[in-house]
Image (cartoon, rainbow, N blue to C red):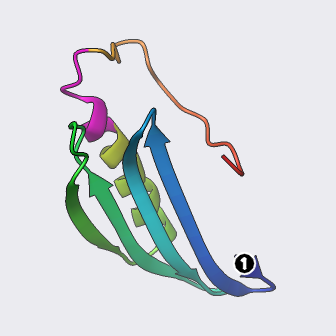
Amino acid sequence: KISGIGGERIITVGHLEKTILVSETKVTGRSSVGVLSSYENSAGNALLETQEIRNQRELNRVFRQTIEDFFKDDPSIDGKEAVSFCLFRGQ
């Protein structure tokens, strides 16, 4: 929820029934800091790692790397041709 120049932003990305990542960020007019939690691409879908995020650029880099890492060893996904993905609000 972001109102005016500040607030909290929570982004959850999943694939089928698995969580890929959860980003919880506090946003002000000048900064964006928080944590990003990544999950294993496994039947148990356990928490893999939690990283501190110090700015929006770092969030974007870690966000992309986390999604790439989630799918890199998944035999059901052929990522050779994949170049981007889309986020949909409210899903």
x then y, percent, for residue 9: 60, 72
Q: Residue at x 29, y 15 (%)?
A: 76
- Residue that mark 1 sits on: 2
Q: Residue at x 54, y 32 (%)?
A: 85
In the image, residue 40 sits, relative to residue 82, either above or below, namely below
Instruction: Name the image quarter holding the N terminus.
Output: bottom right
Specify whether residue 86 is painted magenta: no
Quadrant housing residue 15: top left
- Give the residue type at disc 1: Ile
Q: Which residues are magenta?
A: 68-75
Left or right placement of residue 91 versus residue 5 in this view: left
Left or right placement of residue 4 versus residue 64 in this view: right
x then y, percent, for residue 30: 61, 86
Q: Secondary structure at mark 1?
A: strand
Label 1 environment density (alpha carbons within 10 Å; few <14, some 14–19, many ≥20) = few
In the image, residue 15 sits, relative to residue 22, either above or below, namely above
x then y, percent, for residue 50: 25, 68
Quadrant housing residue 16: top left
